[in-house]
Amino acid sequence: MSTIDEVIDQPQPGTIQFDSLRPFAGVVAVVICGVCAFVDMYCTQPLLPMFVQLFHASKGAAGLTVSSTTLGVAVAAPFVGSYAERYNRKNVIVGSIFALAVPTLLAATSSGLPQLEFWRFLQGVLMPGIFATTIAYVTKAPGKFTLRITDADGENIQAALIDNQPIISPAWSPDSSGCTCPPQRS
């Protein structure tokens, strides 16, 4: 005879289940991390006119404070995506947040534009670890719907769920290790 906990823990047909103790808290944490990373990325944009005056620089040179961060993200993202797949994503995200704090604080101490651009580039290198995730999408073939999950770099495509009914509303598990899909039966 099964206990009530065993019955509750059994997956429903057509559902991929992962740990869902605090799904709302996990979603809120991921949203906050993403928002803060993008705020950090573009925080110098409203300051560009001040940088032109303060550092006696051209508008293009001041604009590099934004572009250098974007370049750092572009350089590091493919590597971080692969790294995040080998290690616990939560540890990668938390480690990146703490590591990102260092160049962010040091950027505030910059005495010149080149020094600021260096710290901004380093920020960009560290940012992909915060939003290095897996991508999920649904494909449709005649009589078959497939939920596919891929690494952030587009590699390692896996079929997470194959069903003859449409797969609607997949959602990330709180630890970002996979998706949950409610059953879509009529």
Image (cartoon, helix red, strand yellow):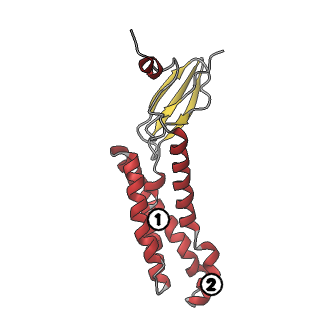
94 or 50, which lies in front? 94
Q: Residue shown at 66%/15% (left/top)?
A: 186
* Quadrant that contains the N terminus: top left
Image position, residue 172 (x, y; %): 52, 38
| Image position of 63 with respect to 82: above or below | below
Mark-to-mark CA distance, 1 and 2: 22 Å
Q: What element carries label 1?
A: helix
Image position, residue 128 (x, y; %): 45, 56
Q: Quadrant of residue 88?
A: top left
Q: Quadrant of residue 63?
A: bottom right
Ranked by sequence position, the earlier of labels 1 and 2 is 2
Look at label 1 and name its amino acid. Answer: Gly
Image position, residue 178 (x, y; %): 46, 35
**Residue on which disc 1 sits:** 124
Image position, residue 23 (x, y; %): 52, 38
| Image position of 91 with respect to 23: above or below | below
| Image position of 146 with respect to 71: above or below | above
Q: Is residue 42 left or right of residue 153?
A: right
Look at label 2 and name its amino acid. Answer: Met
**Residue on which disc 2 sits:** 50
| Image position of 60 with respect to 83: above or below | below
Q: Residue shown at 60%/86% (left/top)?
A: 52
37 or 136, which lies in front? 37
Q: Residue shown at 52%/30% (left/top)?
A: 180
Q: In this view, does 88 lie to the left or right of 130?
A: left
